[in-house]
Image (tube, rainbow, N blue to C red):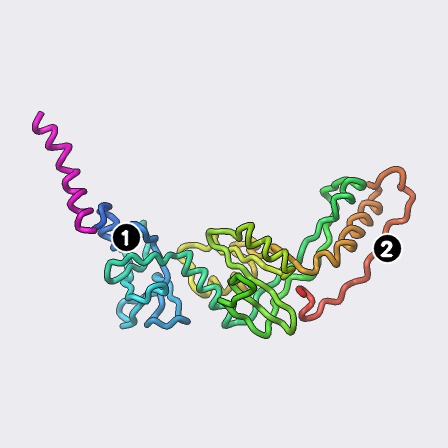
């Protein structure tokens, strides 16, 4: 009985003593040098240069460079296990409560690239007809939807981050002449409804860039490629969450849908002989016409 009680109490004493010393109870995490609140982070700053993001997979320990945390500024150590099943990562040289994570690093890296490059791929906007059009002409899967703009790499006059905009700070504010575009970088947490409402009330075109699917081993060059092409492993990562010119083109979107329905003979019988709406004139897209 005494032996049984001792078997129960001994592990508890060990756990309590470790906790009392402020250490980590998870043996694996102690070995890795992580605190309970930290997540493995493969990105650091070479020689504490805020523009020189480095993946731990590109680190050569013999090169003499030093690596730092972009969040707290403290020195990093590259952990590169020989076991191929284990992930490589940076840890703080001195145990820290810093909560800098891979997600935060990707977010900062993407913003920095946009500020440096002053360009990003802009997608076209797919516009559905208004509900009353669907009610009268029905939904037909084979009917194409109207596209506003075209997919193209767009160059801006200025691109800034951390800009105060009427009570909020968008991730990126891009300007071309007197036109303004917000860019939101999404890694794990999407844009909340409160911020979406704020964007719509001010009627400012806003682009969402979804980088949550980046592989763990991605480098800064991979992030840049995503921003410049709008693709990640064949998946589109760009989406207009609000387009200030959408309403101006809604009638064109309605007519584009109706015309196709009529041409294919899918329209209501009562207006079967009615002439379809005339084709809208081709739009000549010039630099600066994709957003207001």
- Position of 46 with respect to 127 (left or right) is left
Q: Which residue is mark 1?
A: 35
Q: Secondary structure at mark 1?
A: loop
Which mark's residue is nearer the viewer, 2 or 1?
Answer: 1
Please tell me which residue is depicted at 78% across the width and 44% down the height of the picture.
133
Q: Which residues are magenta?
A: 1-22
Q: Earlier in the sequence, mark 2 or mark 1?
A: 1
Please tell me which residue is depicted at 70% across the width and 60% down the height of the picture.
245
Q: Is residue 14 magenta?
A: yes
Quadrant in which the C terminus appears: bottom right
Mark 2 and mark 1: Cα distance apart in space: 66 Å
Give 32 or 7, whichever is nearer the viewer. Answer: 7
- Position of 95 with respect to 118 (left or right) is left
Give 234 or 149, whichever is nearer the viewer. Answer: 149
Q: Secondary structure at mark 2?
A: loop
x, y percent for residue 198: 59, 56
- 6 relative to 204, above or below: above
**How many residues crowd mark 2 within 10 Å: few (<14), some (14–19), many (20+)?**
few
- Position of 170 with respect to 282 (left or right) is left
Q: Which residue is mark 2?
A: 278
Predominant secondary structure, magenta span: helix
- 223 relative to 17, above or below: below
């Amino acid at each position: 009985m005494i032996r049984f009680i001792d078997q129960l109490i001994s592990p508890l004493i060990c756990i309590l003593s470790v906790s009392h010393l402020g250490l980590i109870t998870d043996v694996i995490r102690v070995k890795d040098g992580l605190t309970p609140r930290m997540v493995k982070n493969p990105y650091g700053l070479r020689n504490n240069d805020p523009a020189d993001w480095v993946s731990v997979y590109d680190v050569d320990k013999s090169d003499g460079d030093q690596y730092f945390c972009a969040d707290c500024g403290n020195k990093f150590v590259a952990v590169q296990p020989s076991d191929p099943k284990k992930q490589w990562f940076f840890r703080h040289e001195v145990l820290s409560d810093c909560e800098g994570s891979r997600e935060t690093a990707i977010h900062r890296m993407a913003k920095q690239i946009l500020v440096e490059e002053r360009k990003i791929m802009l997608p076209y906007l797919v516009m559905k007809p208004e509900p009353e059009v669907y009610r009268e002409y029905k939904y037909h899967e084979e009917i194409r939807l109207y596209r506003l703009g075209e997919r193209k790499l767009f160059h801006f006059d200025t691109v800034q981050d951390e800009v105060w905009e009427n009570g909020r700070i968008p991730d990126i504010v891009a300007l071309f002449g007197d036109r303004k575009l917000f860019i939101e970088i999404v890694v794990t947490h999407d844009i909340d409804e409160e911020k979406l409402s704020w964007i719509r009330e001010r009627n400012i075109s806003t682009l969402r860039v979804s980088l949550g699917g980046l592989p763990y081993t991605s480098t800064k060059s991979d992030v840049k490629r995503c921003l410049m092409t709008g693709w990640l492993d064949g998946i589109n990562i760009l989406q207009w969450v609000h387009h200030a010119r959408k309403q101006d083109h809604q009638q064109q979107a309605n007519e584009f849908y109706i015309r196709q329905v009529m041409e294919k003979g899918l329209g209501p019988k009562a207006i079967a002989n009615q002439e379809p709406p005339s084709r809208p004139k081709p739009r000549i897209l010039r630099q600066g016409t994709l957003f207001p």
